[in-house]
Amino acid sequence: MSDTDLQLLSRYTRHQTEDAFAELVRRHVDLVHSAALRQVHSPQLAEEVAQSVFIDLARQARRLAPETILTAWLYEV
């Protein structure tokens, strides 16, 4: 059974477990990239935006509320 997004995020924040963060990226990179592409209309720029979103996630992970819906947070960012 695989961990939920919030369980992975918790593992990442508490133990700096890079594989947990990598799994979150793997799960959501397509969503983030496609949302960015719809906004910027450039594949290269959309890749940069997606990278920026995941950098923001890494930096703000400890501050996310426990009831955060990660896909919604990623889409909004």
Image (cartoon, helix red, strand yellow):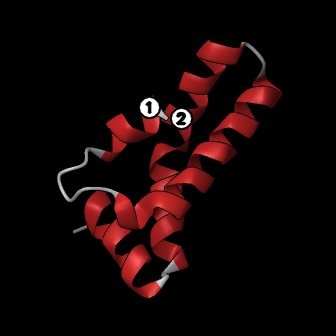
| x and y percentages locating residue 8 in the rendered image | 35, 68
* Disc 2: which residue: 32
Residue 73 against residue 20 in the figure, above or below: above
Say what amino acid the circle numbered 1 marks. Answer: Tyr
Residues at discs 2 and 1 in contact (Cβ within 8 Å)? yes
Residue 75: numbered disc: 1
Left or right of residue 53, residue 70 in this image: left
Q: Secondary structure at mark 1?
A: helix
Residue found at x 49% / y 35%: 77
Residue found at x 53% / y 62%: 58
**Name of the residue lying farthest toward the left:** 67
Left or right of residue 59, residue 68 in this image: left
Say what amino acid the circle numbered 2 marks. Answer: Val
Residue found at x 25% / y 56%: 65
Q: Secondary structure at mark 2?
A: helix
Left or right of residue 45, residue 54 in this image: left
Residue found at x 17% / y 52%: 67
Instruction: Estimate how packed mark 1 is, as few (under 14), some (14 to 19) or many (20 or more) residues with alpha carbons within 10 Å.
Output: some
Precedes in sequence: disc 2 or disc 1:
2
Residue 62 against residue 72 in the figure, above or below: below
